[in-house]
Image (tube, grey):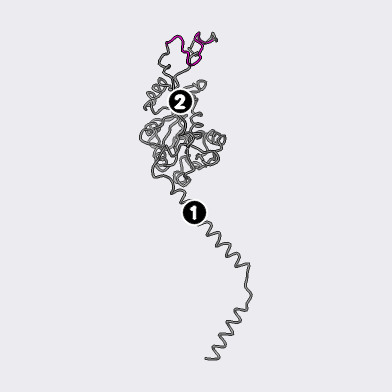
Amino acid sequence: PESLYRAHGADRCSASAQPVDMSQQRDTAFAASLVVASLALAVLLARRRRRLPARFDLQRLVRPCVLRLAPYTFPPRFGLAEAPVLLDANENPHGSTVEALDAALHRYPDPRQARLKAAIAGLRGCAPSQVVVGCGSDEIIDLLIRVTCEPGRDSILVCSPTYAMYQIFASVNDVSTVDVPLSADDYQLRVGAILQSLTPRVKLVFLCSPGNPTGRLLRRADIEAIAAAATGSLVVVDEAYVDFAPVDDEEAAASCVPLVGRTPNLVVSQTFSKAWGLAGARGGGAGAP
């Protein structure tokens, strides 16, 4: 037993006397730190996704500086179009000085665009209160970014290849862009990847249907799924080319306007510049809840 004890002790002493490979220990520690950092990042991203609100709230989405704005009060003059002189707006009561113009362009138009909104609502099958009029749909895109996105902090999400002006307007407003490309085989939305990319900083999701430049209609079920999950964002369906789209497609609806009334975070933008041939009129609008 004594000899065995001594032999065991000698083996332990000889093992402890062997040199230690410090570089291998450093590599092991570095690999472990990378694993820990990756896990921490995954937890952080998961927490950011979990912080999406339980339901959509427009008051939380709009920038506080916009919410603090006092509404402009319009004078009651816009119901008095036949009055010869309206002194409150400093208009020329004698009409335009350009003789070639027959229209009464010396008068400011109704800032509420009541007649125009009613006409658009009748054309598209929605309520006049849901219509927003813009100088082409480009102005609608720019306004949405300015109203919802904090410069230098928030983002928009796009699905390339798509309309370039989304990212251009975002850059002008110092807003970053998250790009989740369309599927390569059929140019449809990659819904899972889009949902993974949603964070509290993504304030707008731009979906172009029919696609520019793909020409593909997006599946309505995919759009509804994204809108349901994007509780911290507005989902904007750009339908600039919807009048060219088929109306009997079983997988894709020609227009998402019917969804506006029951989807609180859905905006559908359209224009009269394409199929209607009115590019010079700069007429566009959006349907919103």
Find the magenta span and give its range.
82-96
Q: Amino acid at mark 2?
A: Tyr
Q: Which numbered tag is attached to residue 77?
A: none
Q: State yes or no: residue 93 in magenta.
A: yes
Visible in this render: residue 69?
yes
Visible in this render: residue 254?
no
Residue position for label 2? 72
Judging from the image, what secondary structure is the residue with disc 2 in? loop
Judging from the image, what secondary structure is the residue with disc 1 in? helix
Labels 1 & 2 near each other (Cβ < 8 A): no
Q: At which x and y percent is residue 261?
A: 36, 33
Predominant secondary structure, magenta span: loop
Q: Amino acid at mark 1?
A: Ala
Q: CA distance from mark 1 to mark 2?
A: 47 Å
Q: State yes or no: residue 84 in magenta.
A: yes
> Compared with residue 176, is residue 17 higher up or lower down, i.e. above or below?
below
Q: At which x and y percent is residue 18?
A: 62, 77
Left or right: residue 264 versus residue 13 is: left
Q: Which numbered tag is attached to residue 42?
A: 1
Q: At which x and y percent is residue 210?
A: 46, 33
Residue positioned 54% across, 88% down in the render: 5
Indicate which label's residue lies in the foreground, 1 or 2. Answer: 2
Q: At which x and y percent is residue 104?
A: 48, 12
Whichever of labels 1 and 2 marks the residue nearer the N terminus, that label is 1
> Compared with residue 84, is residue 186 higher up or lower down, i.e. above or below?
below
Residue positioned 63% across, 67% down in the render: 23
Q: Nearer the viewer, residue 214 or 76?
A: 76
Q: Nearer the viewer, residue 4 or 90?
A: 90
